[in-house]
Amino acid sequence: MGYGLTELFLAIIIIVFVMLIVEAIALNQMFATFKLRVRFNMQLYKSTVQFGGWSWLQVVFTTMVMQLDKFVIALFVGLETLTYYSIGLLIFKQLQQVFLAASNWLLPKVSAKSVMKENLQRLYSLAKRAYFIMIVMTMLGIFTVRNFAFKLWLGEETFSQSIDFIMAFVFMASLMALTYIPSVFMIGNGSVKQNTILDVGLKVVFIPTLIAGYQLGGSIGIVYGYISILLLYVPIQSIIARKKLFQTEVKIAPQDIFFVLPMLAFIPLLFLGNELLYSLIFFALTVVTALWVVVAYSNKPIAYQVEELKSLLKRKS
């Protein structure tokens, strides 16, 4: 007979406690001034909260809000539908980790340039373009191999029940990824509070959207509701990020919507079923549109932009 949840919970507590002891011993060996003791230092606590408190609030609030949809589905529809919904959510979280990893490595570079008072505008625009191309190519790859890959993984029956959730969450993950570069630059530039307020505001709007989406379209309507909010949020975040980073006017500019418009080409794929012909048509359409956006936005050849981005990243701060 196997162990229950209580034993699993206790085992996790023991492992975490042992890890804390090992880390404390390692820190004591590495830093002579480190002392494992409780002391009340208001100035130290205040500086710690100012440094990471806003990010902590963002993570906690996001975690709470992003669990609500599963409770709604389990309560009103049942665990079977929640299972198919959770498969799509799993794909979303995996893609989210990939996109986050691809953007967060810029944070030290942005922070160093901010400390040196260097202009971030060139790096910002180039990073957004390069990141956008990566997002589009990732989506194209998933849309092209979805039948083969997901059927092989899930089987015919589960695939047919979950594919709508999977593709909706893939599109949502790609839209969400468009917010990562502005977020990284705002954090690296010291605008952590403003970035947290923006993100928490998005999650607050998600709550009524969740309810409205479920009432209008059922379980899949929740994801479509999230997508509709993100289509509005991406340009708004871009405007505020430009204001904080480059002291521009708070008004919409072409670069705020350039990276959203090509993503709209994927929306019909969410409703066209699994026809390979349609996938290939939109594959070509989206590639052409993405390349047009990059070239039109910069008025420079793509090869030149790649080399310029490499030179910026290699340059010593």
Image: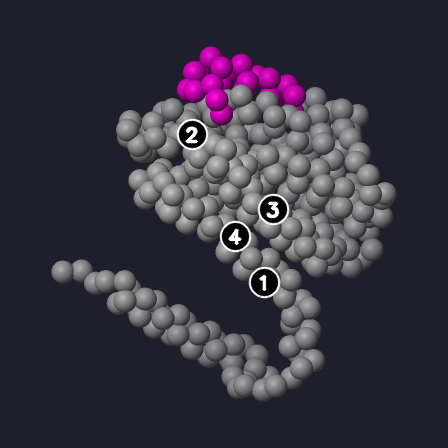
Cβ–Cβ under 8 Å for marks 3 and 4: no
Residue annotated with mark 2: 164
Residue range corresponding to the magenta coloring:
270-290
Q: Nearer the viewer, mark 3 or mark 1?
A: 3
State the image coordinates of residue 28 (x, y, percent, origin top left): 51, 81
State the image coordinates of residue 172 (x, y, percent, origin top left): 54, 36
Q: Residue at x 78, y 44 (%)?
A: 242
Cβ–Cβ under 8 Å for marks 3 and 2: no
**For marks 2 and 4 on the same chain, the one whose residue lies earlier in the sequence:** 4
**Circle 4 sits in a helix, a strand or a loop, which is it?**
helix
- Determine the CA span between mark 2 and mark 4: 22 Å
Q: Which mark is residue 65?
A: 4
Q: Amino acid at mark 1?
A: Trp
**Circle 1 sits in a helix, a strand or a loop, which is it?**
helix
Q: Amino acid at mark 4?
A: Val
Q: Amino acid at mark 3?
A: Val
- Determine the CA span between mark 1 and mark 2: 33 Å
- Determine the CA span between mark 3 and mark 2: 23 Å
**For marks 3 and 2 on the same chain, the one whose residue lies earlier in the sequence:** 2
Residue annotated with mark 3: 205
Residue 280 left/right relative to 259: left
Looking at the image, is 55 positioned above or below residue 77?
A: below
